[in-house]
Image (cartoon, grey):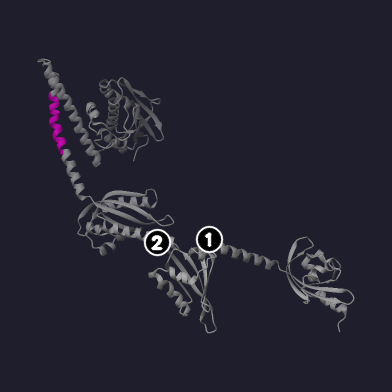
Amino acid sequence: MMSDQSIINAFKHIRVALMIVGASGRILHCNRATDRLFGYDVGALQGRPVSDVLAVASAQDLGALIEPPAIDAIVKGMTGRMRSGEPVPLGIQMTVWDDEQHGAQYALVMRDVTAEVRAEKQAKETLRRAQSAIKGARIAVFEYDRTTDTVNVCEIWREILGLGPTEEVNIHEEWRARLHPDDREVALEPMMECIAGKRDQVNCDYRLRKRDGSDWMWIRSDISVTERDRDGNPTRLSGVMSDITQRKNVEKALRRSMDQFKSAFESAAVGMALVGLDGRFLQVNPALCDLLGYPLEDLLKTGFQAVTHPDDLQRDLSQLELLMAGQISTYQLEKRFIRANGAVMWGLLSVGVVKDDDGQADHFVSQVVDVTEQRRLAELKSEFVSTVSHELRTPLTSILGSLSLLSSMDAEPLSDEAQRLLYIAEQNGNRLHTLINDVLDFEKFSAGQMRYELERYRIVGLVEESVMANLASADRFNVRYEVDCPDRTLAGYVDPKRFQQVMANLLSNAAKFARNDSKVDIALRPEKHAIRISVCNDGDGIPQSFQAQLFNPFSQADAASTRSRGGTGLGLSITKQIVEQTGGEIGFDSQEGGRTCFWFTVPTRPPA
């Protein structure tokens, strides 16, 4: 038989934390595991009050944790106190017995449950988040017990069906009564397959009528078998139900949009195509097939490069590169297409890019309009205008020469009436000569046939020459020109002849529309890589409604005023083309009833 000392020695070496508390509330014995649990040195706890390490005041408090007639208890949630003062959650199994000499004795087996408490806390937090997510996502949970034929649902389920939290209804019958007649089989068949054991999981979409009967809502149900009997037959089904009405409405709108696009694409009177990034046709409409003379199947086997004239391909590819790089959002150009029979067709091509969700180019949308006839008519018109103008200019030059000769004759002076008629004829002849020259220049600019001889010149000298050449206009409209150029060394690249043409147009316009007895200011200022020349006057200004079309050919803000002052309506259009084709920019600032400034720039570097 083991002695008491042997028992105590064995007690001390047990790895589980053990402690015996006497009736006085002091620790009679504890092992090394107990010392380690509370952070004490070996043997330091023996004889100390149990209240030093447990949240109890006395031995009687320990006894209160055991309900008679039981002699033991499992205590959960008690907090111990370590030597450092930090709390430690404990799980305790306690047994009490009576000692004849010393009274009640309490044996405690203790373990640190910090990890278990942390895990339980995390599990509760995870559950709380899951419940919040389910509630936030409006996901309703339900359960069907086949043995009792009962259905249990959560609060969200009742909210979706418009039922109050305490409203007494037969859930199963209420759900069945709300089913859309066309969806009854869709909604019931999956559940019947689960009950029959054919499937373990099913899902379906169906419509339920709202509580007030005003409309239908779309519901998605996901059902699974959660319990079976000994024979493997399903006895319990669980599932979730969510309102997907908004998603269905979006899908419906998307389908409608797709149908509309498809209808517009297929029935469009102009050729349309969806083109992949590799240049192959993804989809083409009948109009494009007719334009190019290909059957649908054959055209889809090829790409835009195969139907593009070789001389126009590089121009198209250059624009595509800019489109892919995001430097432009769309582009438009006229190019030649090769039809299936080898004939050449001129088409106006418009191209836009369609991007994916990441903002990357996915494919192109192209539109082609046949402009072959328009180009042919434009060329005929250009040839006709050029021919007529040339045919008119030769005899007109002779007529003006004759009129000038008659005006200068002194030997046989003409009557006052004859001189008046001669003057009118000469003035109208000069206007007609200017109009013919403007028309010829305009046709050259439009056709890209104008040639320039650009050289570096001191700009102020050219401006002063223009002012001298246009003094007659200033005298005619009773205005004066004033040049402001702080730096007379400013030099840029111009074609002198065309520069004089630009200045003549701007100076004559400024004189025509300036107030009587006012001045026209001509200013030269340096800019980055350019010289800015501005011509400003004080007058009626340019109407806001006309400013957008000011540089269009044959545009006139006030036809009556223009006729009284003279003008062809081509001057500003020609001026804009000269400036831009020689590497500059042009614009204006104007206030109605106030000051108007036209400006243009001359490059200080050789333009491309």
Point out the tag, 2 or 1, that comes first from the N-terminus.
Answer: 1
**In the figure, is residue 476 to the left or right of 219?**
left
* Residue at point 20%, 47% (across, down): 374
Q: Residue furthest front?
A: 168
**In the figure, is residue 506 to the left or right of 245?**
left
* Residue at point 33%, 49% (across, down): 331
What is the quadrant of the C terminus in the image? top left
- Residue depth check, mark 2 versus mark 1: number of the one nearer the observer: 1
- Tell me residue 46's x, y (percent): 85, 68
For the record, the magenta segment spans: 387-402
Q: Which mark is residue 251?
A: 2
Residue 190 in view (yes/no): yes
- Tell me residue 515's x, y (percent): 31, 23
Label 1 sits on residue: 136
Identify which residue, 240 or 455, lies in the foreground: 240
Identify which residue, 70 or 51, lies in the foreground: 70
- Tell me residue 430's x, y (percent): 18, 27
Residue 304 in view (yes/no): no
* Residue at point 51%, 82% (across, down): 233
How dense is the environment of label 1, judged by Cα within 10 Å: few (below 14), some, or many (20 and up)? few
Amino acid at the residue labelled 2? Glu
